[in-house]
Image: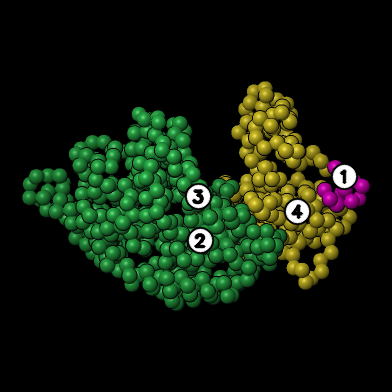
Amino acid sequence: MPQHFVYMDYNATTPLRPEVKDIMVKALDIYANASSMHEAGRRARAEIEQARASVAAIIGAADSSSVYFTSGGSESNNTVFMTMYDIGRRTPSRRKIITTSIEHPCVMNSAAYLASEGFPVVYLPVDAYGRVDMEAYRKELTPDTLLVSVMAANNEIGTVEDIRTIAKMAKAVGAYVHTDATQAIGKISVSVEDWGVDYLTMSCHKIYGPKGIGALYVRPRSPIVPLIRGGHQENGVRAGTYNNLGIIGFGKAAELALKDLPEFSARLRSLRAMLKDGLVARIPHVKVNGHPTEVLPNTLNISFPGAEGESILLSLDLEGIQVSTGSACASGSLEPSHVLLATGVGPELAHGSIRFSLGKYTTEEEVLYVIEKLPPIIERLRRMSTVSATETAAVN
Amino acid sequence: MDTFQWLYTDTVKDHFMNPRNVFNPDEAFVADAEGVVGNIRCGDQMMFLLKIKDDVIADVRWKTYGCASAIASTSMLSESIKGMKLRQAYGIKPADIAAKLGGLPDNKIHCSVLGDKALRAAIDQYLEKNGRAGEFKGEDAVVICKCLNITDKDIETAVKAGARDWHQLQEATKIGTVCGECKTKAEELLHEFAHIYS
């Protein structure tokens, strides 16, 4: 094991925070079925409803009963798309799906499924910073649009979308609006009331809570069809015995994330700036991806032309630094990051991209350690590369 | 392999971190032959430089843009061909290099081991320069379609000429039009060569 262990992959997942862990350890003894009428059941149910209120608070929902617990972000997204499938297959005159070319694979593949069932699906282009091309959106927004699904913030480059405007435009043609806010909650201010969305996806393990639990916000009176049928839990929207442990952990994680948001966001923004400035100053010919200002406070995506992403990632790994890459070589596919390609970054730069996602436990020392270790790694890889960094930079 | 310890074997790690025979522009290495394959758009590119004396590889240098296994496999190959007869070097296969590295993940053998192709490209260039073009052609071929005696070299030639899918490959070579048993293997190769020559 290397001496250092610097985790900079918080967008992939986060560690469980101690306060959440403590409450979950206690919750291990809350064994009762929260659907039971007896006292033990009612006690468990009270804990769950308290958690639901905390989760509703982090997305600014007026009514906590519009929050439904699921197994995570993927289930929440699938529930929305399968609901649209159910509606759209009965009304062929309104079943167009508009999403973007930079969504998480979960939304991409759900949309692709609807396309395979004959639904018209549009993947909106984005600009060089990853923001939705609003002119293209305006043109696509026809009266047959059933759903508009745009992520609140991108997992790879951190770009934050203007969901409020996107939702307003969709509502004007009578479409439903969904946003995958998996990367947004706990990092930026989120409000379903202000944004005006019908559906919002959340995942708990990105906000220092446990894995295997998430939630879907559904605006009162917006349609929802269960993905998992069974008992009457969650008002019949999501069957299955209540996951006491996960839900209670999620409640605590959401409560703390909301409380910490102003301080967290300011601190991470400054750490991100420090990392960005340090790397840009010490490594020639780099390209910072994503939006310069409308970006998550913790996410920094940089392309290093002339060096390949998997080689960079593994070199950093040997120094104890954990990051991720948009290179195809690391994913086992031949195509590099669809997000970077959609922003117009060429494959050369996409293959050489690294995502640093910082978090609650990132320190200045860790940022300085990365700034010290990365430049010689890039220099070494560029020296043995057939590709000149300056030429590649010029190509893009 | 214990995947917890590292993604690759210790030998791969060693060659990735301490690559042998990397080209250094300052040493004025004068090559008798050069071969380049791969495409940076696909994430891998490789260059081999050879010094050749009496049909023996006297010295070698290389450069690679690619992942850790691309770097390590090229380094390993460069070590193993020093002093080797051209004819023998021409027949080296990705599996031979992977074996010397103590194994590579399956998905890496096809996409990252390009060294043997860059080496053959360099040897081909050398033969051509010396009026011996095509002298080793066919010697390294492996029969893929047993019914019609179609080799990996035939598939490579078809891809170089533009075939990019099964249908186009069949039009070019008639491969798999009898029993069809070779389709999976042939498509793997098609994919691999398309990656290299795109």
Other-residue count near label 1 (Cα within 10 Å), few / some / many at <14 / 14–19 / ≥20: some
Q: Residue furthest top?
A: B178
- Callout 1 and callout 4 share a chain: yes
Badge 1 and badge 3 both on one subunit: no
Q: What amino acid type is highlighted by mark number 1? A: Ala
Residue in view at x 28 percent, y 42 percent: A222
Residue at the left extreme of this rendering: A39
**Measured Cα–Cα span from mark 1 to mark 4:** 17 Å
Reading the image, the residue beneath label 3 is A135
Which residue is rendered at x = 25% and y = 62% of the image?
A: A255
Read off the chain for label 4.
B
- Which is nearer the N-term, disc 2 or disc 3? 3
Disc 2 versus disc 3: distance between alpha carbons?
A: 20 Å
Residue type at tag 4: Val
**Crowdedness of circle 4 by 10 Å Cα count: few (<14), some, many (20+)?**
many
Locate the C terminus of chain A by quadrant: bottom right
- In the picture of the structure, the residue carrying the numbered disc 4 is B36
Query: Tell me, what hue is chain A?
Result: green
Tell whether label 4 touches label 1 (CB within 8 Å).
Answer: no
Question: Can residue A299 be seen in this snapshot?
Answer: yes
Cα distance in 3D space between marks 2 and 4: 34 Å
- Chain B is which colour? yellow
